Image (cartoon, rainbow, N blue to C red):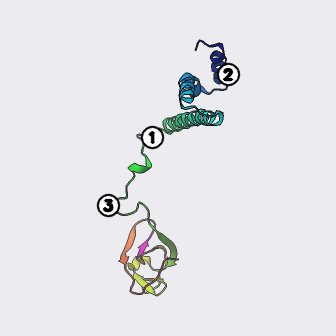
Amino acid sequence: MTNPQLLRLGEHLQHLKLLRVQERLETLLQEASAQELTYADFLDRLLTEEVTAKEEKHVTMRTVMARFPYRKTFESLRPHHGHPPYRLSTVLGRKVATDCLVTVETNRSSVPPAYVGRTVEVHWSAEGAIEVYHQGPLIAPPLRPRASIRCA
């Protein structure tokens, strides 16, 4: 930058911490002149470049601070074996009856006698399958209901 006006612009940009624009000011001015951009278009291009640079810097900085072992993009995420990476289900609390059955709507699932009187978690999926868990592990085989019911 040999022009006094460009030197002054560079100082202002440095003071405002618009570092990307400061680096590329001459190039951006030449492009704007060649393309005959209006002042508003030039200013838009200038600020867009600076905002993009700052966002990239913040993402990089936060990724480093989070100490991720690697960086994944949204495009690189794929469902596992064609299934979504989440489960659509309602979790219900049910007490096991003395006949070792857990009731959900019109469906009943049999559980081992050791769980009689205890409260268990019933996972009722959007497809209507019922799974019974107690403090983590699955305690009854998944039940596919005969009646057509929906997850609430």
Q: Quadrant of the N terminus?
A: top right
Q: Is residue 132 magenta?
A: yes
| Residue 126 coordinates in the image, percent (x, y) | 45, 74
SS state under label 2: helix
**Residue pictured at 42% horizontal, 78% vertical:** 128
Mark number displayed over residue 44: none
Amino acid identity at mark 3: His
Q: Nearer the viewer, residue 63 or 142?
A: 63
| Residue 14 coordinates in the image, percent (x, y) | 63, 22
| Residue 9 coordinates in the image, percent (x, y) | 65, 20
Are the two marked residues, 1 and 3, in contact with CB atoms closer than 8 angstroms?
no
Does residue 122 sit above or below 44 in this rendering?
below
Residue 105 visible in the current orientation: yes
Amino acid identity at mark 1: Phe
Marks 2/3: CA–CA distance: 55 Å
Residue numbers of the magenta segment: 129-135
Marks 1/2: CA–CA distance: 37 Å
Residue carrying label 1:
68
Marks 1/3: CA–CA distance: 25 Å
| Residue 81 coordinates in the image, percent (x, y) | 32, 61
Q: Nearer the viewer, mark 2 or mark 3?
A: 2
Q: Nearer the viewer, mark 1 or mark 2?
A: 2
Residue carrying label 2:
12
Task: Answer with left or right where residue 145 lies relative to residue 95.
Answer: left
Amino acid identity at mark 2: His
Residue carrying label 3:
81
Quarter of image, res 18: top right
SS state under label 1: loop
Task: Answer with left or right where residue 129 lies relative to residue 95.
Answer: left
Total numbered labels placed on residues in the image: 3
